[in-house]
Image (spheres, coloured by chain):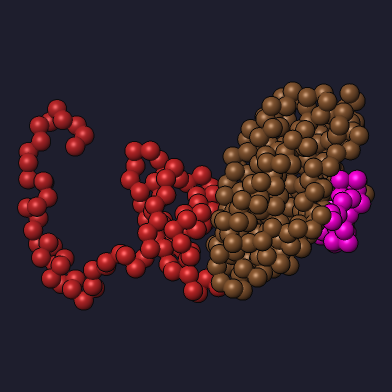
Chain colours: A red, B brown
Amino acid sequence: MSKNWPLWEVFVRSKNGLEHRHFGSLHAADAEMALENARDVYTRRNEGVSIWVVESKHIRASNPENNGELFEPAQDKVYRHPTFYNIPDEIKHM
Amino acid sequence: MMKEELYEYILGVADNSLILGQRLGELCGHGPSLETDIACTNISLDLFGQTRSYFQYAAKLIGNDATEDTVAFLRTEREYRNVLLVEQPNTDFAYTIARQFLFDVFHFLFLDQLKNSNDLNLSAIANKAIKEVSYHQRFSTDWIKRLGDGTPESAQRIQAAIDDLWRYTDELFHTSNIDDKIIEAGIGVNLSELKDPYYSRVIQVLEESKLVTPESKWFQKGGKAGVHTEHMGYILSDMQYMQRTFPNMTW
């Protein structure tokens, strides 16, 4: 039965003020069912205050074959991290 | 009003949740899909939670050495007061959903009134439970629509289940002499007032789901008086097994 249902990705916000995070995926026939299933599968132990669902097919993923051109150029550019400032002693936590 | 009468009344309310919860629990690991399996057992746990609240109160009322466990597990079949509807088997997923829907619509209307009970324990339980049951009703209503307005096979199966279980709906509104006393005392819910809103809501959903409302005026009854269908003994033998085999055991 569930073989024929499309796959959905579930995002749950666990507390007000935090962002929605990817929790997992599930099968459902429509958006309402996806929300209900997500409520039952992922929030029954009081994990959430808000749920988003999106059909997995609508997610465009980067291609692992392109990892070289996408991500490698960032590896040797340490100057993009704000680590070269001298922080005054009186500032403790930064 | 006697404590024993209130105790009897509470059984009539709580046994519905207990037996329906037990029926849904049978689907644990056996649901048609992982998602519906978890949904049904979630509802089951909601119902058991409600049952515990009722039985803890009921046990206090009769005193002696009664506990929620003795009330739940150590009665004989004739002492259970649930309606026949909730003991009907999980013949297929359509039956499970039809049984749930026909009970949820009643359960929501019932709790909505029980919130106003003069008995503070019962109104507190109702206030908590109605949020759960509101979700149950949404779940089963959505599924009635999906199956009714789905494929020819799903429509045929859910129609068959509705037709078959329809005969058990009238009993939801029956009262015993004890019930009537509790209702007069402002503690119990006046069931006759729920009947019209119940059938109009059910019929509305059936129409939206392209299903036919059964015309039969022949109804079954007996559960509320302790006279159950043949299924009840099997349910109890499963449910009571541990307490009967190892008396007074605790987890």
Most foreground residue, B215 or B25: B215
Q: Residue at x 36, y 65 (%)?
A: A56
A10 sits left or right of B120 in the view = left
Looking at the picture, does residue B41 appear above or below residue B196?
Answer: below
- Residue B89 covered by magenta stretch: no
Residue range in magenta is: B218-244
Looking at the picture, does residue B137 appear above or below residue B123?
Answer: below
Total of numbered circles in the picture? 0
Where residue B172 sits, quadrant-wise, is top right
Q: Is residue B63 visible?
A: no
Q: Residue at x 76, y 33 (%)?
A: B189
B85 sits left or right of A26 in the view = right
Most foreground residue, A86 or B32: B32
Where does the N terminus of chain B fall, quadrant-wise? top right
Where residue A86 sits, quadrant-wise, is top left
Residue A24 appears at what percent x and percent y?
42, 60
Residue sitting farthest toward the bottom:
A65
Q: Residue at x 81, y 36 (%)?
A: B10
Q: Is residue A5 visible?
A: yes
B224 sits left or right of B57 in the view = right
Q: What secondary structure prevails in the magenta region?
A: helix
Most foreground residue, B183 or B199: B199
- Residue B224 covered by magenta stretch: yes
B103 sits left or right of A20 in the view = right
Residue B7 appears at what percent x and percent y?
85, 33
Residue A75 appears at what percent x and percent y?
13, 62
Residue A66 appears at what percent x and percent y?
18, 73
